[in-house]
Amino acid sequence: LRTKSEAKILSDVKRTGVRAPVLYDVDFEDKSIVMEKINGSLVKDIMSSIDDEKRKELAIAIGENIKAFHDGDIIHGDLTGSNMILIDDDLDDISNNLAIFDFGLGKYSDLLEDKAADLLVLKKSFQSIDYDIAIQTFDWILEAYDSNNQSKMANKIAEIESRGRYTH
């Protein structure tokens, strides 16, 4: 069931315009998925080493991509810098060269709570890399995610954090 779900979500993610690996084959018997290998660097590995201008570009691309699949009511389920690749390490065209993958824990939901929890997982994963850089980077991600209604999402994330499970 998880294999089928991941394959469907991956196909649907691509329909939202988000760059994700091309699906080549799904074997339900072996519970395996064959997909495109994307060359580049994991976001978690480059986030601390790029300058603020490039990190902001990267954050904007991340926010816009997450917003696109969230608008399709797709929840990643494990949004981390380990599940995003800057294709071919192309810092000159970040917005067109960010790929998001590993939707194995993904699901469909239109709930603000689920979308905020998805973003909170990303925030916490970035904080584990470099706390100071993560704060500014996540603010840029939220700005790009929803410039019109940023406070609504930010408030929901803060509400979830205040429950204690996600405290720093």
Image (cartoon, grey):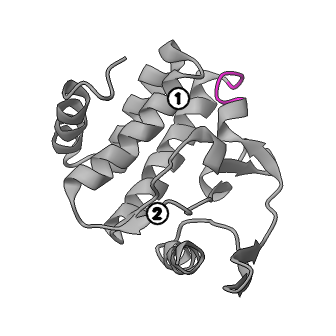
Q: Amino acid at mark 2?
A: Gly
Per the image, label 1 sits on a secondary structure element best described as helix
Side (left or right) of 60 relative to 19: left
Which residue: 44% across, 55% down? 66
Q: Residues within 10 Å of mark 2 (few under 14, many from 20)?
A: many
User: Closer to the N terminus: mark 2 or mark 1?
Assistant: 2
State the mark number for residue 106.
2
State the mark number for residue 126.
1
Q: Position of residue 12 (x, y in %)?
A: 49, 78
Q: Is residue 93 magenta?
A: no
Q: Amino acid at mark 1?
A: Phe
Q: Is residue 47 above or below residue 57?
A: above
Give the main secondary structure of the magenta stretch.
Answer: loop
Question: What are the residue bounds of the magenta stretch?
Answer: 46-50
> Is 7 or 154 nearer to us in this picture?
7
Residue lying farthest front? 29
Per the image, label 2 sits on a secondary structure element best described as loop
Q: Residues within 10 Å of mark 1 (few under 14, many from 20)?
A: many
